[in-house]
Amino acid sequence: MREGACVPQQQVIRDFGRSRTKALANIRAGLPMRQRAGMPRWKKKHEALPTLEYTRRGFRLKDGRLYLADGIAVWSRELPKPPSSVPVYRDAVGHWWASFVVPAVTEQLPATGRVIGIDWGVKETATTTSDDHDLRHSQHGRTAAQKLARYQRMTARRKPQKGQAASKGYREAKRQTAKLRRKVAAQRADTGRKWAKQVARDHDAVAVEDFRPKFLAKTTMARKAADAAIGATRRALVEMGRKHRGAVHLVHPAHTTMDCAQCGARTKHALPLSERTYACTACGVVSPRDENSARVMLVRAGLNPAGADLVSPATC
């Protein structure tokens, strides 16, 4: 421990102390095990990835370079404000990353006078009330599935026996698998951020379904739902709205596929996923199921002046 800087070592001890205090408070409160949070889990040495956090007295920025207390200097991009800390970590591929913690900076955009409703789905990742802003399924995971299966077979064939050291081929197969997974995750994040940026720039207010991806994770469409990265895309949309000071209304998803956006009536039975057309029995309007749900988002958020006398459907 004498060889490394004392700043990240002290920060590890402080983080462990805070997490332990929080865990003990949850235990005293009588929370069940699945609701207890804060206490770090122990990991084996060969399974844990190194992570170090440098506070203000452990790093400095000068001439576009980051200087750590260990005597390491790396390139750094321009930051909007001085960082308060710098977590440095290594990923599964073996690359080192520095993540700067800086205050959030808002960028006020000119008003457009437009609003948009967004409904999440599987056939299309996001269906909106504007045809120009629909987000189609990019299928990044499906594109890389064949190559990923090849690397996984290589890993399985080269897996060492219990008690034996891993071979160079096994480590390389695991690295290639991690590299491909990271590439797919980066593609999904990039697609979601670009779409969220466009939606935030073109609209003053957004009504989006506060959908929980865990629901689809328990169905037969779990693989396609995971490839759509609905959760990451929704987070990107909320972050863009906060950055550009746009109003983002999170609408409860209950009965959004059963309500009519035109008159507010609700069907007696839930629509199966195979039925993609919504037909209202009260007013007789017929529209695509996802587009009707997107308009329901606007009505429930109070953003649609033409919907049901400005009254949102009941959410019971």
Image (cartoon, rainbow, N blue to C red):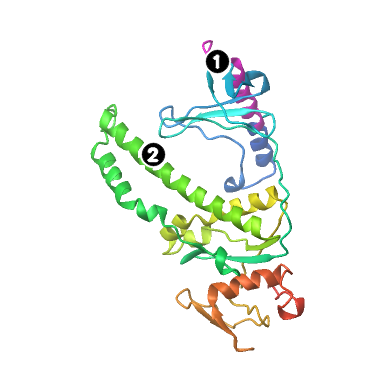
Q: Secondary structure at mark 1?
A: loop
> In the rendered structure, which amino acid carries the disc numbered 1?
Asp
Residue 146 percent location from the top left of the image: 30, 51
First along the sequence among labels 1 and 2: 1
Q: Secondary structure at mark 2?
A: helix
- Could you say which disc has been placed on residue 119 in the image? none
Numbered marks: total: 2
Q: CA distance from mark 1 to mark 2?
A: 28 Å
Residue 272 percent location from the top left of the image: 48, 76
Residue 191 percent location from the top left of the image: 50, 52
> Which residue lies under the disc numbered 1?
70
Residue 64, located in which quarter of the rendered image?
Answer: top right
Residue 221 vertical position relative to residue 264 in the rendered view, above or below: above
> Which residue lies under the disc numbered 2?
179
Residue 268 vertical position relative to residue 254 in the rendered view, above or below: below
**Is residue 234 visible from the viewing direction of this image?**
no
User: Magenta region: which residues?
Assistant: 1-18
Residue 263, located in which quarter of the rendered image?
Answer: bottom right
**Is residue 92 visible from the viewing direction of this image?**
yes
Few, some or many residues within 10 Å of mark 1 (<14, 14–19, 20+): some
Left or right, 314 with respect to 168, comes to right
> In the rendered structure, which amino acid carries the disc numbered 2?
Lys
Residue 222 vertical position relative to residue 55 in the rendered view, above or below: below
